[in-house]
Amino acid sequence: MREAMLSYLHILMILSMTVLLSAEAALCRREWMNAKVVRRLVRLDLIYGVLALLTLLSGLARLFWGAKGLEFYLSNPVFHLKLTLFVLMLLLSIRPTLTFMRWRRQLDADGSLPGASDIAGTRRRIMITAHLMLLLPLLAALMARGFWG
């Protein structure tokens, strides 16, 4: 039962991250940008960050307390690729996070909204992160079935 619950929690966190990232991508558009959207993006991104941390923690729980054991994961190159991809996604999400906070500060200071090129660049980073996320389940399936391990 422990393995099933650890797996469930990890998958739940990954799916939740996907939902939040999708919401950010959907809202981060020039034609939809207004004061409420700027504030909502900041909140969504905060929740996304918390979910990323919970995803990492649930993954570590599987690593240490899961049925396959520490040796299975540490000796598996697919695990290292999956972890590297996750870290890359987190690194890519830093700039949108800082940008959303800057947009909110500008909004609070003078009521201005971000420019079209700023929105487009931020959305592009979010979309790259979202597309990289598509690889995580593939790597998880490969790892679970012993490929390259």
Image (tube, helix red, strand yellow):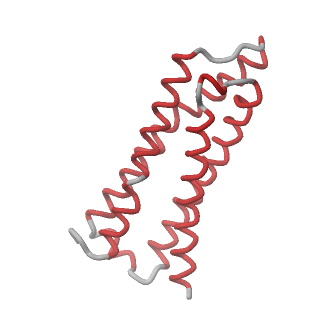
Furthest residue in direction left, as rendered: 148
Q: Residue at x 23, y 71 (%)?
A: 147
Q: Is residue 90 left or right of residue 114?
A: left
Query: On screen, 134 above or below 12?
Result: above
Across and down, in percent, residue 24 comes to: 60, 39
Q: Residue furthest bottom?
A: 1
Q: How many labels, in total?
A: 0
Q: Is residue 91 above or below residue 139?
A: above
**In this view, 3 is above or below 110:** below
134 with respect to 118 (left or right): left
Is 64 placed left or right of 21 in the picture? left
* Extreme residue toward the top, this view: 110
Side of 93 relative to 111 (left or right): left
Quadrant where the C terminus is found in the figure: bottom left
Residue 50: x percent and y percent? 63, 51
Above/below status of 136 relative to 104: below
Q: Quadrant of residue 110?
A: top right
Q: Residue at x 51, y 16 (%)?
A: 117
Residue 91 placed where, x, y %?
A: 45, 40
Q: Quadrant of the N terminus?
A: bottom right
- For this orientation, the residue located farthest to the front is 31
Residue 138: x %, y % from top left:
35, 62
**Residue 83 lies in what quarter of the image?**
bottom left
Identify which residue, 75 or 148, lies in the foreground. Answer: 148
Q: Residue at x 39, y 79 (%)?
A: 69
Q: Quadrant of residue 15?
A: bottom right
Q: Residue at x 29, y 76 (%)?
A: 145
